[in-house]
Amino acid sequence: MLRGKYYKIVAGIVPIAIIAIAIMTVTRPLDWSKPSIAQIMSSRSPMWTLSARGIKKRPLFGWGFDGFGIAYPYIRNPQVTPIVVNLDEFTYDYINIKGEISTREIPTYKAHNWILDTTLSVGILGLLAGIAVWGYYVCLALNSSMGGIEAVAIAYLIFTFTWFDCAQYAHIAWWTMSLAAAVKSASATRFSRFRAESGQLLITH
């Protein structure tokens, strides 16, 4: 009965997540003259090249949250290290070769890849911590009585290969994983209680 209830919750969450992701994907401007793979990558490759450059500059601890945008002025041109005087939300001010302050646009604050975004923001050490957390929750899902719930985590990780963690949908995956953890914990508690009660009965008799 309880298991069926959880399945109904997941069955309601997953379609909503799929619809939300689909809407955010198809509403992007597409150039149908390009091959399909180019549509899927959506100019990710240049951002990933810049990301690798940023990671090389600060590998251990990263640049801070939203690291791609913070690093962008320093990785845009590998031949020049600008003197940045102000970093805004989507622009930055720097001193040009004439000694004057100029403004450039920051195209995005995300590398559109979870591994690169995480490493740019909190470094390799932070990435390892993030992988450990994900691994822990995936193991809980695999061992949960809710069979197949690990597919949500796997689907989300595949999605973030060309996207990024975002408040609009990231919580759906974490809620699902937390649900699996709660079910696992409840099952373990019931089993421990059963063993304790069985032991008491044996001692009594």
Image (cartoon, rainbow, N blue to C red):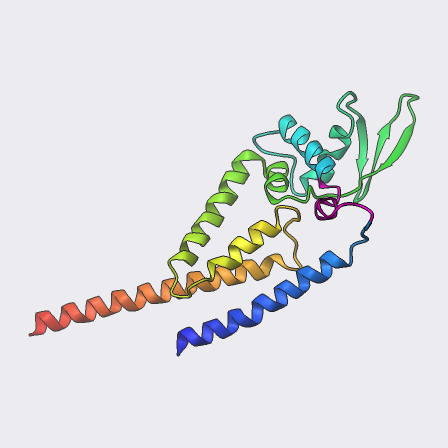
The residue at the point 75 percent across, 58 percent down is 26
Examine the image and state in which quarter residue 92 appears: top right
For this view, does 100 lie left or right of residue 178?
right
> Residue 29: x, y in percent?
81, 53
The residue at the point 62 percent across, 64 percent down is 17
Q: 33 and 186: which one is in front?
A: 33
The residue at the point 71 percent across, 37 percent down is 45
Examine the image and state in which quarter residue 189 appears: bottom left
Q: 23 and 118: which one is in front?
A: 23
Residue 18 belongs to magenta span: no
* Above/below status of 155 relative to 196: above
The residue at the point 80 percent across, 26 percent down is 83
Quadrant in the picture for the N terminus? bottom left
> Residue 191: x, y in percent?
27, 66
Task: Tell which residue pokes out farthest to the bottom in this image.
Answer: 1
* Above/below status of 200 relative to 160: below
> Residue 60: x, y in percent?
56, 30
> Residue 152: x, y in percent?
53, 59
Q: How many marks?
A: 0
Q: 139 and 193: which one is in front?
A: 139
For this view, does 3 lie left or right of residue 122?
left
Report the span colored magenta.
Answer: 33-44
Quadrant in the picture for the C terminus? bottom left
